[in-house]
Amino acid sequence: MSAGSSRASVLISPGKARFGATSAAMIVEAPATRADRHKLFDLGYVTVTPDLRLEVSPKLKTEWQNGREYYAHHGQPLRMHPADQASRPSKEFLMWHNENRFRA
């Protein structure tokens, strides 16, 4: 992580997805590909609630001393997600992620 950076140095290269990354790719999206958000989701520093709101773990700040960019979106509804309900990740998966991966 570079000094003075407000974004965690957590990028993932395309094609190196782990469990959850595909679902994260479908829901934690912004202009272009935000690999940092996908990686934070995979590592449990951010999650998405079943009602499609972004939650950011306080551990991002305590463990990485940054995350300001992400905390600005904490509790906000996702702006971008598949319109087709069948293309969205299941509520069961999101609940699992919240209970088992998210670093609350």
Image: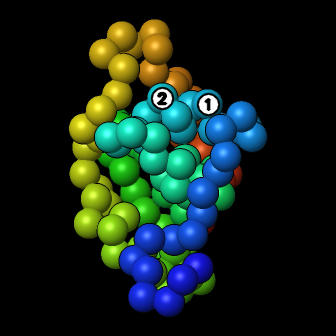
Compare residues 49 and 23 and report the one nearer the observer.
23
Is label 2 in a helix, a strand or a loop? helix
Left or right: 72 as drawn, with respect to 6: left
Q: Of 56 and 25, which appears nearest the observer?
A: 25
Q: Position of residue 11 (x, y in %)?
A: 60, 57
Q: Which residue is mark 2?
A: 26
Task: Give the residue displayed 60% in from the left and 63% down from the top.
Answer: 10
Can see residue 98?
A: no
Q: How is the image coloured?
A: rainbow
- Of the residues shown, which amino acid type is indicated by label 2? Met
What's the amino acid at mark 1? Thr
Location of mark 1 (residue): 22
Q: Residue 72: x and y, percent?
A: 26, 66
Q: Residue 103 versus residue 8: which sits nearer the camera?
A: 8
Is 77 located above or below residue 9 in the figure?
A: above
- Picture layout, residue 7 above or below residue 89: below
Q: Is residue 45 left or right of residue 17?
A: left
Q: Quadrant of residue 9?
A: bottom right
Q: Position of residue 81 (x, y in %)?
A: 34, 28
Give the CA separation, mark 2 to mark 1.
Answer: 7 Å
Mark 2 near mark 1, Cβ–Cβ under 8 Å? yes
Are there few (<14), some (14-19), or many (20+) residues within 10 Å of tag 2? some
